[in-house]
Amino acid sequence: MSNSFPTFQKRSYLAYADKVALTEFMSHCRHFRLGDAARVAYWWCASEGWRLSPMRIRESRATRLFDRKHGTDTSTRVELSALQIDSDNRDRGVYYQASPVLSTQRVLRQLDIDFENFTFIDFGSGKGRIILLASDLPFREVLGVEFSPELHECAQRNISQYCGNSKGRVRSICSDATAFELPATNLVCYFFNPFDSVVLKSVLSNMATSLSLAPRKAFIVYHYPQDKNLFGFAPRFHLLKEWRKYCIYRWE
């Protein structure tokens, strides 16, 4: 499937955490503060070193080959500035970037739930890779919520290509996340930093209201949270598990 969006060119193979750690490490070494340098090196190995593990190498390969294998278009990063978006929250959104394949599959499969009784929702679903991966599990329904019509249309094409005759259970919905009405079913909600804290608080507040009015089970899978304290204002979301850069919350 051809990609109709501008191609994002990655300027560096180093992540932000790598650059900060490397800068501090070199500064300590130049001033012969070897103990401090050792502590920075230990921190990086403990928190970020997993990215050089065999699992990470397999992850990179699976992510790189996903579209080639399935004939989809989910990999290319897209900046919101390249899109036509009619929403007051346009400037609060974050560029589209696909989640990793193997790690996400592992996290979803390890949820201790009866998938048939849950609806899966990806907020800020973009081109739809996560809803494609979720469709491999027997969720009652799989939904993606995306406020960009262009990304939404791309997701619809990917669903048709990936899901075939079972695509009726999998849908992309073009909607602002703050205006989306949650279905009255058990929920698994996925976030990969799709928007800023203002929108996230609004979405979590809507979820809390819905779950209080119609009590049911709910989980949040949050990939790469920038600030886990954001869930502090919604105390009934309890952190259940952390694995690498994934946090799983359960509604109590």
Image (cartoon, rainbow, N blue to C red):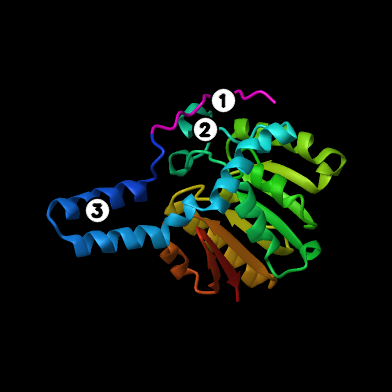
Decide: few, some or many residues near mark 3? Use Cα within 10 Å; few <14, some 14-19, many ≥20.
some
Task: Let me know if residue 169 appears in the view.
Answer: yes
Which of the image's four quarters has the N terminus? top right
Amino acid carrying mark 3 in the image: Phe
The answer to which of marks 3 and 2 sits earlier in the sequence is 3
**In which quarter of the view is residue 112 placed?**
bottom right
**Residue bounds of the magenta highlight:** 1-11
Residue at 60 percent across and 23 percent down: it is 4
Q: Which mark is residue 125?
A: none
Q: Which mark is residue 25?
A: 3
**Residue at the right extreme, as displayed:** 165
Decide: few, some or many residues near mark 1? Use Cα within 10 Å; few <14, some 14-19, many ≥20.
some
Rendered location of residue 75, percent (x, y)? 59, 35
Magenta region's main secondary structure?
loop
Rendered location of residue 17, percent (x, y)? 35, 51
Q: Is residue 212 above or below residue 190?
A: below
